[in-house]
Image (cartoon, rainbow, N blue to C red):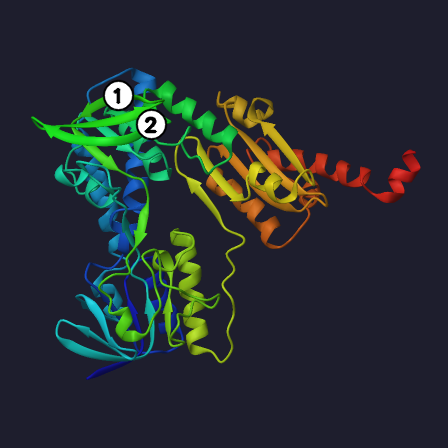
Amino acid sequence: MKSFDIVIIGSGSGGLTAAYTALGFGKKVLVVDKNLPGGECTWSGCIPSKALINEAKRIYRAKEVVGDFEYDTSEAMTAVHQVIQNVYAGESVEKLQEDGIEFISGYARFVSPYEIEVNDERIKGKKFIVATGSSPLKPPIPGLHDIKHLDNESLFKLDKLPDSMIILGGGAIGVEMAQAMNRLGVKVDLVEMADRILFREEESHSLRLQNILIREGVNIHVGSKAVNMFEKEGKVTLEYEQKEEKYQVTSDKLLVAIGRKANVNDLGLEAAGVLFDNRQIMVNKYMATSQKHIYAVGDVAGPYMFSHMANVQGIQAVQNAVLPFNRKVKDDHIAWTTFSEPELARAGMTEREAREKYGDKIRVYTFDFDHLDRAMTKGKTDEGVKIVLDQKGKVLGASILADRAGEMICEIQLLKTMDLNFSKLASVIHPYPTYGEVFNKIAKKVAVDNLLQNPVVKIFRK
């Protein structure tokens, strides 16, 4: 029977990060996955979606210059497939083995707390890390399981995009794909049950982005509950209910993008004595399960289904597994980005969430980019920043709607993670003209407000 120091089930972001971290500690590592290494991020998530978004931007810019023209979307999908292969080359089976990580292709299942079975072979491990990720969630809508439909796992396997598409779900995936598809010439109908897209984001920013998509030509149906689906003569029809009235939209394809579910089934977790439910594997702050030698990271453990969170968890799980002391994985400083154009990035609380928790004991600063020189030079002023601070000037949350907002949010993340006062940015020289200059402008206001709240200054003013 083969034996390893650390056995990792799953080779997505969390699994591969854990594998290389364990290798760095000099451990004998095995990675098991039924699919090729890379996971959802490489094959059906971050990488292909951003590749398609970039291709859509390229075509959209060209159309702005020369006007509308015919475009063969097979070229876009060829570009997407090439990017996937380029990324996979750095994490292929051959690369893993060359680096010293053993990889077995197959379904892994626990048969005891210290043994798994793969391809009828039993393998022993001293420590285990479960990183099986998540799968597209399929809602219980009548007719859905009777029709052919796309999800993010099948979308990027297409060789050519359809002429029209219904996208069910106005979250990050739905919004990103709606804009990209529309820019590539696909007629898009986006159906969302909430009263706005990206309903968990800062309301004013999600509504701005919604209007931008509508102006570009995306048909958005918010406050719309899908109640039935059927297929006829190669077309898909979705019936939805809006304000007690029923409507229909018909397209060539249907993309379901309403969320994801953790891959917890068929792992033999019961045999291993690992507690789980239909949402996730139960872990503590050290990423350990109910069995102290078995850890779980990434989407299968939650609470955030982001590749960057899986990476952090993977590193920390290995350190806790091999070192004599444990460190907690902190998820109270997490940021994320919807890669639309403009991008919508967020860290911490929205204004509404902050007010629900702290009442009026917060300070809110907004800055619209019609007053930012860099944005004005590009003719893009329908963007902005909202910063939510506590009374002392510490960051509670931030929302940025702008080009490269995903990069901009990192400056806020630094302040929030290091527990620094926002006014610190008032003394940081930002290059001009840049988008980042907005933080310097806001910080100067914060510094003045901090000064006005000083007890000595209050007495002097009186």
Counting from the top left corner in percent of width and height, residue 24 is at 39, 73
The disc labelled 1 sits on which kind of residue? Tyr
The local crowd at label 2, few if under 14, some if 14 to 19, many if 20 or more residues have their Cα within 10 Å, is: many
| Total labels drawn | 2
Give the numbered dot on residue 224: 2
Say if 305 sits above or below 370 in the image. Answer: below
Counting from the top left corner in percent of width and height, residue 360 is at 68, 37
Do the CB atoms of the residues marked 1 and 2 lie less than 8 Å apart?
yes
Farthest residue, direction left: 233
Give the numbered dot on residue 247: 1
Q: Element under label 1?
A: strand
Q: Is residue 28 left or right of residue 351?
A: left
Q: Residue at x 41, y 23 (%)?
A: 212
Counting from the top left corner in percent of width and height, residue 65 is at 33, 18
Residue 431 appears in the rendering: no
Say if 251 sits above or below 425 in the image. Answer: above
Which quadrant of the figure has residue 240?
top left
